[in-house]
Amino acid sequence: MAGRSTAAQPAASKMLGELEDSLGVKLFERHARGVQPTWYGEILVRHARLAMSEMDRAHDEIMALKSGLSGQASIGTVMNPVTHLIPSAIAAIKESHPRILISVEMDFSRPLVAKLLEGRLDCVVGRILDSGNAEELDFEPLSDEPHSIIGRAALPFARSPTSN
């Protein structure tokens, strides 16, 4: 326990004692120069290391997701854009975000927009055929296509910085 504050030592000793009481075994042998794990303590130490390693991995995964370097995206598209626009867009995203997982679903515009509004898709490349849901959608017309990129208006990435 060298290097730890003296205030933390009593709390750690108390917690260790409570853990030993609850398990009904002695986890550590206490000596003048520190503690030595027993056979039971070795098991606890091994699992604690695994738990800490998993916590580190969870932290790294959360930070990567938070930074946009990894994560998942689901795209719905109609037939025409799937042949050239979607593969090019995915390739561009993968260049800067190689760990992101992108799924693509192909269907007609109406069912895709319905899935978008249900939260089952993140964006859609298609036509807005029903203006009844327009207030729930944010869309960007594509210049060389009769289609738009459509997202739910509530999504944080749906609005461009200039439209806020």
Image (tube, rainbow, N blue to C red):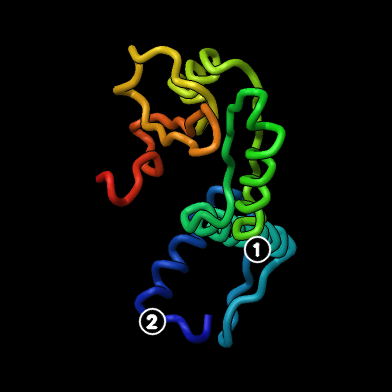
Q: Residue at x 47, y 68 (%)?
A: 13
User: Relative to residue 1, is residue 79 drawn left or right?
Assistant: right
Q: Nearer the viewer, residue 135 or 32?
A: 135
Q: How many marks?
A: 2
In this view of the protein, can residue 101 be seen by the observer? yes
Q: Position of residue 6 (x, y in %)?
A: 38, 81
Question: What residue is pinned by disc 2?
Answer: 6
Q: Residue at x 60, y 77 (%)?
A: 35
Q: Is residue 6 above or below residue 132?
A: below
Q: Position of residue 83 (x, y in %)?
A: 71, 33
**Crowding near the residue tagged with mark 2, few <14, some 14–19, many ≥20 C-alpha atoms within 10 Å:** few
Measured in 3D between alpha carbons, the distance from the residue under mark 2 to the one under mark 1, in whole angstroms, is 23 Å
Q: Nearer the viewer, residue 86 or 104?
A: 86
Tag 2 and tag 1, C-beta contact below 8 Å: no
Q: Residue furthest right?
A: 39
Question: What residue is pinned by disc 1?
Answer: 49
Q: Residue at x 52, y 85 (%)?
A: 2
Q: Residue at x 59, y 42 (%)?
A: 72
